[in-house]
């Protein structure tokens, strides 16, 4: 780091070699900033794409599981429908047996009714005369009573068996009704399972597309990271070139030249604008004075002549730049022997 006067430094900063270097450095800083912004944007997009791909995969798996559940439910309900159908067929068999018994009683009942009519006719028209007629009438009356008793018995049996036949048929129809209802529900669940399966297939395809997009973004982010590294190396190379070409120390924020009149002081030339990081707002290519003790942590305006040395106890500039602003209420009253520094 060579020593230069403030006038020589300003002439150097205005010279064509430095202006050419500065143009290249600004371009390198701008390129690095753009590359870093692109890298951050791609990194954020990559995180979102990976989260979306993972969420899409989970949704697809959940949909696939839901489709399996719908298929199981459809199979269960279809089994119930089949069971009701089997019971209906069993009831149909019982109904047919009962129908045969009822039909047989119906025929027998018809015969009994005919027998009663015949016996009544015989009672109304007895054969013979006198005692024979009385005897025939008594026999016909006894036969009629017997026939009527048989008829009443058959009617009771027929009514009972007819009621059983009706109950069995009601059971058959109820079983068919339940089977039909369960079949409808099973069909609905089967259709729902197919729809969910189609949705899950679409979700799997969407998740695959998102994974492909995430891979593309990962490659782009890696390329952007390489661009950032390359831009950083370019900026570092320019700082090395400044050190070799202009005899300075090149930092990240400043270029430094030694003060010609004080071994404990140096000039600092800002490489960028910064209104918040330092004790004073910094502008590009502005020259500042720094001490060996504090360095860039305390910047003073550049001026000709010997600098005010903090090591010698004069803290006027430090009080000015680090102390309260003009018009602010002091945190304490000046101690005895301290001087007030008037703010311009």
Image (cartoon, rainbow, N blue to C red):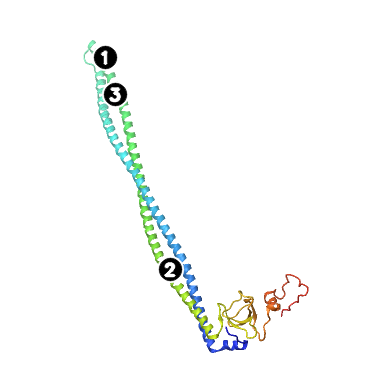
- Compared across the picture, whether 185 is left or right of 287 comes to left
The circle on residue 231 is none
Q: Which quadrant would the C terminus be assigned to in this image?
A: bottom right
Count neighbours of disc 3 (C-alpha within 10 A) and say few if under 14, some if 14 to 19, many if 20 or more.
Answer: many
Q: Secondary structure at mark 2?
A: helix
Would residue 95 appear left or right of 15 to someone viewing this image? Answer: left
Question: Residue 151 got which mark?
Answer: 3
Asked whether 48 or 86 is in front, the reply is 48
In contact (CB < 8 Å): disc 1 and disc 2: no
Alpha carbon of mark 1 to alpha carbon of mark 2: how far? 118 Å
Asked which quadrant contains residue 180, the reply is top left
SS at mark 3 in the image: helix
- In the image as oriented, which residue stretches furthest toward the right? 336
Task: Measure the alpha-carbon separation of dots 2 and 3.
Answer: 98 Å
Give how far across and how far down residue 87 sits, in percent.
32, 38
What residue is drawn where x is 47% and y is 71%? Answer: 39
Q: Quadrant of residue 116?
A: top left
Question: First in sequence: mark 3 or mark 1?
Answer: 1
User: Which is nearer the N-term, disc 2 or disc 3?
Assistant: 3
Look at discs 1 and 2 and give the one toward the viewer: 2
Tell whether label 3 touches label 2 (CB within 8 Å): no
Mark 3 to mark 1 CA distance (whole Å): 20 Å
Question: Which residue is tagged 1?
Answer: 138
Per the image, the residue denoted by label 2 is 218
Frontmost of labels 2 and 3 is 2
Q: Quadrant of residue 128?
A: top left
Q: Is residue 296 above or below residue 106?
A: below
The quarter in which the N terminus is drawn is bottom right
Q: Nearer the viewer, mark 3 or mark 1?
A: 3
The one nearer the camera, 1 or 187, is: 1
């Amino acid at each position: 780091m060579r020593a230069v006067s403030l006038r020589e430094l300003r002439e150097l900063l205005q010279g064509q070699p430095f202006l050419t270097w500065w143009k290249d450095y600004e371009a390198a800083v701008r390129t690095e900033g753009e590359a870093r912004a692109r890298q951050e944007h791609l990194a954020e997009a990559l995180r979102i794409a990976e989260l979306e791909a993972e969420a899409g995969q989970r949704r697809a798996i959940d949909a696939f599981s839901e489709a399996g559940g719908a298929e199981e439910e459809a199979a269960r309900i279809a089994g119930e429908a089949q069971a009701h159908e089997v019971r209906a067929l069993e009831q149909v068999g019982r109904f047919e047996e009962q129908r045969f018994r009822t039909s047989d009683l119906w025929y027998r009942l018809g015969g009994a009714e005919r027998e009663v009519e015949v016996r009544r006719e015989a009672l109304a028209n007895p054969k013979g005369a006198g005692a024979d007629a009385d005897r025939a009438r008594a026999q016909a009356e006894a036969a009629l009573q017997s026939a009527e008793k048989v008829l009443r018995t058959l009617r009771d049996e027929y009514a009972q068996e007819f009621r059983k036949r009706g109950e069995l048929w009601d059971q058959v129809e109820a079983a068919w009704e339940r089977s039909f209802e369960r079949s409808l529900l099973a069909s609905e669940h089967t259709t729902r399972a197919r729809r969910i399966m189609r949705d899950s297939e679409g979700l799997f395809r969407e998740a695959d597309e998102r994974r492909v997009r995430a891979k593309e973004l990962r490659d782009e982010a890696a390329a952007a990271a390489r661009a950032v590294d390359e831009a950083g190396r370019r900026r570092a190379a320019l700082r090395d070139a400044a050190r070799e070409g202009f005899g300075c120390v090149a930092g990240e924020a400043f270029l430094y030249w030694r003060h010609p009149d004080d071994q404990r002081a140096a000039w600092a030339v800002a490489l960028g604008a910064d209104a918040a990081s330092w004790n004073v707002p910094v502008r590009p290519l502005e020259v500042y004075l720094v001490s060996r003790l504090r360095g860039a942590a305390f910047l003073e305006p550049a001026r000709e002549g010997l600098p005010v040395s903090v090591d010698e106890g004069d803290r006027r500039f430090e009080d000015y730049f680090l102390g309260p602003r003009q018009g602010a209420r002091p945190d304490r009253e000046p101690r005895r022997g301290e001087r007030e520094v008037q703010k311009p």
